[in-house]
Image (spheres, rainbow, N blue to C red):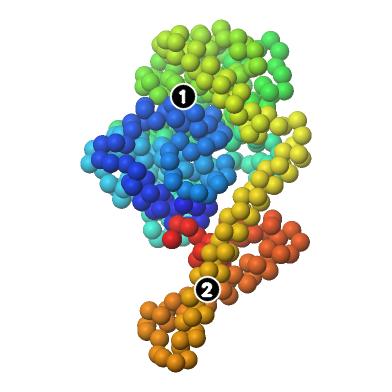
Amino acid sequence: MNPSATGWIEKFLTDHHKHTTAGSLPTLDMAYPSLRQAGFIYGTSIQTFINTSSKIVYSEEEKTKINLLGALIISYYDTIEDGTDHDCIDALIQFYEYMDTKKSYFSFLQSISSKNTDRLERILHTRIQTNESIFKKNFSHLLTNALLFIDVLAFEYFLIHNKNPFDYASKLEETITQIVFLSLHSKPKKDSYDELVLKLFASSVRYNKIHDTEYISLKDINVAMYADSLEKKYILDLTSLANWNENQASQHSFILSLGNQLNVSDLEINNSLSTVQSFINAHKEDISFFNYSNPAHHFYKQTSRTVSIAILRNKKRLINEITQSKELMILLGQSTTRELSSSEKQKVKRQLLDICKTIPSLAIFILPGGSLLLPLLIKFIPQLLPSAFNENKQ
């Protein structure tokens, strides 16, 4: 499965059902610790929280897509009895229509797609992008999608109450950002990490304008409205992330006060703090915002990683394409002594077209800087690449 090519959602659903049986799908509460361990809750997907049975090395963006879709699907089947994949996709399309109050990119993407799975692929791709330009994002928005789990909670709200989820999502986002900003403002001395986290949340919000929370207190923020355990865990986890420090005791009193106001046990509070600490200690080298001291080096490192993944994939695909072309040569040779069948003619036509597509791909690949251009070609013009370049259709 390749989340950067068309057809990946249908491939995901097919592969996912091979590894699940009726009634074996976890609840969202059960899946939450895995989503947290994968980094999705913290906005940096280090891995996928479900087994994809794929040999492809995924980029962080692709892992985020898989984690988001997986969490949304689990939320659907956790809420709707006797649901189907078709109904789930329809519900997700309707949900994101509600969330797109400005009728901007979602509406446009809907108009150019016919299949609902294709529409959802485009929506999810747009969803995991930041609100900044690609150049600004690469240098300053280093921890992306910190508030993306709001989509999952809002989708669950939409399924349960059958009403527009926008107000719920907007209010939850506002509550989280207020708490995070308040906790950071309450520090007597902010370091570079704190300043970066403030920028992170400021550029991550989708439904609200950032307001200065310097003059409000924790008691002014109404957290009593969040009674669901997942809502409480998520608010607590993002606050723990924002207040992370190499000294684990830093800001413990604020988080303890928040936990008490959320009516969460001290055990859950300490678990949230220790889980953040363990995650960062284990993956600090892979989490981009910790490399903010040198943005140019970070950009180079991220680009090199993307190119390396693309080269690895393309090497196997090109070999596969050449292997497939052997059959073409056999059929062309046989065509001189016998009439090819209709299916054989179609195969010859398709493979000849694939070779015509391969030639410009190879030409781009060997040009100076071609390894940078090929990933862009795969991402933006996948239909120009041979069939072997799309695992989702195999």
* Helix, strand or loop at mark 1: helix
* Residue 293 figure quarter: top right
Q: Position of residue 344 (x, y in %)?
A: 41, 80
Q: Nearer the viewer, residue 393 or 293?
A: 393
Residue type at numbered disc 2: Ser
Residue 358 drawn at (x, y percent) = 59, 70
Q: Position of residue 120 (x, y in %)?
A: 43, 50
Q: Position of residue 391 (x, y in %)?
A: 48, 58
For image coordinates 58% across by 55% down, the residue present is: 313
The numbered disc on residue 325 is: 2
Report the amino acid beneath label 1.
Tyr
Residue at image location 69% in from the left, 47% down from the top:
304
Q: Is residue 145 above or below residue 328?
A: above
Q: Residue at the spot x=63%, y=67% of the render?
A: 361
Q: Earlier in the sequence, mark 2 or mark 1?
A: 1
Q: Which mark is residue 234?
A: 1
